[in-house]
Image (cartoon, rainbow, N blue to C red):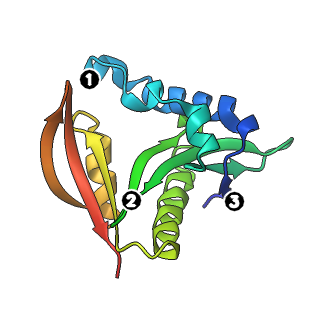
Amino acid sequence: MTDARIRPARPADVPDVRRVIDAAFRPYIARIGLVPVPMEADHAANVAAGRVFVAETPTAGPARVTGLVVVDRRADHLHLDTVAVHPGAHGTGVGRLLLEFVEAHARALGLPEIRLFTNALMWENQRIYPRFGYEVVERGATGPYDRIHYRKRLD
């Protein structure tokens, strides 16, 4: 299991946010034939808006950002916009920690569910999200993106 900790991203983290998202999503470009939306996001604006939380993992030197989530509070749910784990941290529990954080964050905000979507060609996600209690709500195209929408109702 990881010894990472989750904290709100700071402006100084923007290069690390960009680095993690680029490493996590770049392999999908060839598969889906498009640049994934998170790679084109305004990371500085998301950090400034308080929407980004990073997983910081201790190393021999200073702690390093190994994963992150981008969330957006809506009236009736928490929208999980992005989950990204650097490939070098795959299998360490960082992704689990981030998803557990999102659930705790939604509960703390008093929201009854979490919603997210993923590209249908990112089939790895279709195995991961159901293991964490997310259910498929619908599938549909948004522009050139074929998306599967999920939700997790919180008890």
Asked if residue 103 lies left or right of residue 155, the reply is right
Residue occupying the point 57% across, 33% down: 43
Q: CA distance from mark 1 to mark 3?
A: 33 Å
Number of marks in the rendered image: 3
Question: Considering only order in the chain, which callout, 2 or 3, is on the residue closer to the N terminus?
Answer: 3
Residue at the disc numbered 1: 32
Disc ID at residue 3: 3
Within 10 Å of disc 2 (Cα), the crowding (few <14, some 14-19, many 20+) is few
**Which residue: 18% across, 57% down?**
136
Of marks 1 and 3, which one's residue comes earlier in the chain? 3
The image position of residue 88, as x and y in percent, is: 59, 36
Residue located beneath label 2 in the image: 74
Q: Residues within 10 Å of mark 3 (few under 14, many from 20)?
A: few
Q: CA distance from mark 3 to mark 2?
A: 30 Å
Q: Residue furthest right?
A: 61
Q: Nearer the viewer, mark 2 or mark 1?
A: 2
- Give the quarter of the image for residue 45: top right
